[in-house]
Amino acid sequence: MVVEIYKEKYRGQIREVVLGATGAEGGTRSHTITVGGETTLPFLHFEGKIPNRPVVAMEVWDIVPEDWPAGLKEYFADVLNDPAAWAKKCVDVYGADLIALYFKSADPEIRDASASECVATLKKVLEAVGVPLIVYGCGNAEKDNLIIGPLAEAAEGENLLLGGAELDNYRSIAAAAMAYKHSLIAQSPIDINIAKQLNILISEMSAGLLGRIVMDPTIAALGYGLEYSYSIMERARLGALNGDKMLAMPMIGNVGHEVWNKKEAAVSASEEPGWGEQAERSMAWEAVTAMALLHSGMDILVMRHPGAVRLIKKSIDDLMKENSYATT
Amino acid sequence: MRMILIGERINGMFSDIARAISEKDPRSIQEWAKKQEAMGAAYLDLNVGPSVADRVSAMRWLVEVTQEASSLPLCLDSTDYDAIEAGLEVCKRPAMINSVPAIQEKMDRVFAMALKYDAEVIGLAMNEEGIPKDSESRIALAMELVANCDAHGIPLERLYIDPLVLPCNVGQDHGPEVFETLRQVKLLSNPPPRTTLGLSNISQGAKNRKLINRTFAVMAMACGLDSAIANVCDQELLEAVATARILLNMDIYCDSYVDVFKSQNK
Amino acid sequence: MALTGLDIFKLLPKTNCKKCGYLTCLAFAMALANGKSSVDACPELSAEARETLSSAAEPPIRSVNIGSGEKIVKVGGETELFRHDKRFNHPVAIAVAVNDNEDVEAKIDKINSLSFERVGQHYEVDMVALMNTSGDAAVFKEAAVKAAAGTDKNFILVTRDTLAMEAALQVLGPRKPLLYAADGDNYAEMTELAKAHGCALAVRAGDLHALAELTAKVIALGYRELVLDPGAQDSSRILADLTQLRRLAVRKKFRPFAYPVITFTTKEDPAEEMMQIASATAKYADIIVVRTDRAEYLLPALTLRENIYADPQKPVAVEPGLYAVGDAGEHSPVYCTTNFSLTYFLVEGEVSATRIPSYILSVDTNGTSVLTAYADNKFTAETIARAMEEYGLEQKVGHKNIVIPGAVAVLKGKLEEESGWNVIVGPREASGIQKFAKLHFS
């Protein structure tokens, strides 16, 4: 019996966003990375094009992350004090496709580092690795608005992916992106309507920014509301594929940030005997969170654990294999 | 599915269009093409009007000059199938045939044309006896259109059933029947045909035309209307349609949803 | 969607013989589609057409029961491609494989121990898949005896050899295991066995076309308690096939695929296997047979199942009560919030990050968030005071200070009256808790 294979023909397409810039384009990256461009839902190669595989960024902080569980810190023990070395290790040893650099030191409650200190760190990291960079501030909106300009200017031409733009605070970052030719992350709080509205507002500042927006719907960890993010992402992806241009952006998720403050990543086997060994379990918690998000359309995963990174990259290899049906 | 709006203005019953056709002066036609496209029309309806002797060459000319000004797909509006065929021959991209009733010889002619030229077809829920009143009869005629379309091997998504509206000050009792027909059309086949109607007809000769048109449009959308031949320059109509799409959960809400809808169709 | 007018019309002889009482076949098709006539009115229908028309009233995917007793496993019955369109109905069932030529008792014990408590929920694996790895019917039967005695979980019997299946059924028949599997060679005998024992039967073929054909053959033998395996071996193909099966069943009402789907993990490494489980859980598997028995990898997988299959239309709630975060004692701060899961866990996460052992009072607001519950009169001075009493807050701490969410600051006065405690207004967002705690509790 010949089964008529069911292929969806979507009208829309996810935009492609290029991250990083090589010498020819005004930057110093060894290569650029393109995300997005899908014409169907994740990995359904039989009915559409998935021109760019999802990629993995690893976190690098400009302070020692005291709160990371010991088992996780161990992977970076020799480099935690040196963001450049840390970034290099992530790329060379752990296979990160990008580096997500967090300027936590700028937080007034931590070290209140100045813009120029942050710029110095950024330059060192840019020199240490050839992969594209994602740049986050400290999470304090007022301070971030002060450092984002200098950071963007210092890295003019590098096409960084600038984090932090939200509905209540997006102009500085969008302006920095426009002025110094960077891309930006538009973050919404697990709210698809705000996600859409923010994309519109940013594109109203400059139509040229449309091809430079990556959406962050804000993900929740496995077991802590993952399904909310998952369904928002599926709805946004379907909307985009059905022609909604204001949701047709690639997506990014801070998996590491959400997972590693959870009990399942932190507790030892002695505290929860039924849960198995912490080392494997915590890595698994991050890997499964990431895996589910791949299926709802995540294009850039920002992660911490090298084991989880390895696992997810292998899964991406597997899912990027062709799965067309022979035409009979 | 978008709410596909088919711009109605290039119709020889408007004096400027009639003049343009008789004088072979393309300017007003091209202006209206551009204007309707800017307002968000997805197709441009072309009708040579009632007072043209040589409909075949008039339609061909209309298609040619419109295509110079706009790359929107065209909706060829005539009861003269030779004129439609002449137009299809020079269309640069697949067009829509407006229209065919549920009459066998006409369906045979039109569906064959649609197959040959990759065209979409508007099918009218009427036959030799005219427009029936009750929804059951309209649906039976729609079913004939569906069965014939399918028999010719044309995908049903290319068929647009028009349940045919009468002006509300003349055939007011047809209104509820039309809504019921729209609902039931979606059950005729899987995938179902699409639906359309000539929106301005509902208010022909009545007062408050725009108010009637946009109210009817959103009510019909709630019953499954996919498209309409309408006055796309009516801002309030566009806003009502945009709002209806949000209320029907067809578009994802955002605060700027009206602006998005207007620019989306570009 | 039931069969449409056109679908029905295509099944009719199109002779317009009028025996049904309608002028044309088209008219009869319309009448049938609207439930105004019956299939029996047409004496000229082919047997196949009659069959298709009769089965059209059935759901797009059958629900199938495996096993019996309290732990009966129900799979299938799905109607959606996306959970946000409505919900997924029956959580994917996970079976852990046991080889008949290994230490069956030890493995069964391990599987029984895979029982997890987290956030007031209880997760466990649903079934044991007994594999006829030895290829020997006697060994298989022996293993079945041990397995049957060792667990009250339900079973999948995995063998293509009908003799081995029969042998195992002599032991496990009454437990109504899923029989895996009927294939192109053995389907006649396997169907007989399934019928005789009243067990669900898996049907396995090498691709979708072969699967549809084989399923049709089994149905023709009169059996419908089926589970399908499209035989895919790699992750990408599994995703594609399972997507096709779900789409064709739900969107096209393709009857040969109107059954739940079973898939097996294929990776050797247990962590990689876990990733396959995650994929299949998100995308359309109804049963997954796995080899790993490691808690580290199954707990996340079962949690993902919980998340994907959560009903989007029901607010997710935690069990209301008094929760200790860290080693909380009589000096510990007390925070008050609702029992909406998302809220609760956000608060718990932030409180945990303060590194100050604390208590969280989770008030029963029917799983709604702070502002919704406040608007709905579920999060009020009265309900909070009542919860404080119900969960024995006074016995747990030596002080009388309670922190309420900043969003409901207006409740401070009334709550102080109702409870006799001192009410501190906390931050509006959970993300403000760490800063707040530093200020107030260090």
Image: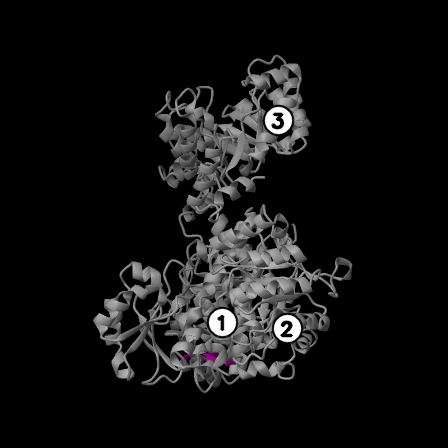
Residues behind callouts 1 and 2 on a single chain: no
Output the chain of dot 1. C
Q: Residues within 10 Å of mark 3 (few under 14, many from 20)?
A: some
Q: Amino acid at mark 2?
A: Glu
Q: Amino acid at mark 3?
A: Glu
Estimate the x, y position of residue A33 in percent, counting from the top left.
68, 61
Estimate the x, y position of residue B159 in percent, counting from the top left.
53, 34
Q: Which residue is mark 2?
A: A117
Q: Is residue B75 magenta?
A: no
Output the chain of dot 3. B
Mark 3 and mark 2 in contact? Answer it, CB < 8 Å.
no
Output the chain of dot 2. A
Magenta span covers which residues? C139-148
Distance CA(mark 3)–CA(mark 1): 61 Å
Q: Which mark is residue B31?
A: 3
**Residue at 59% of width from left, 73% of height from top?**
A113
Residue mark closest to the camera, 3 vs 2: 2
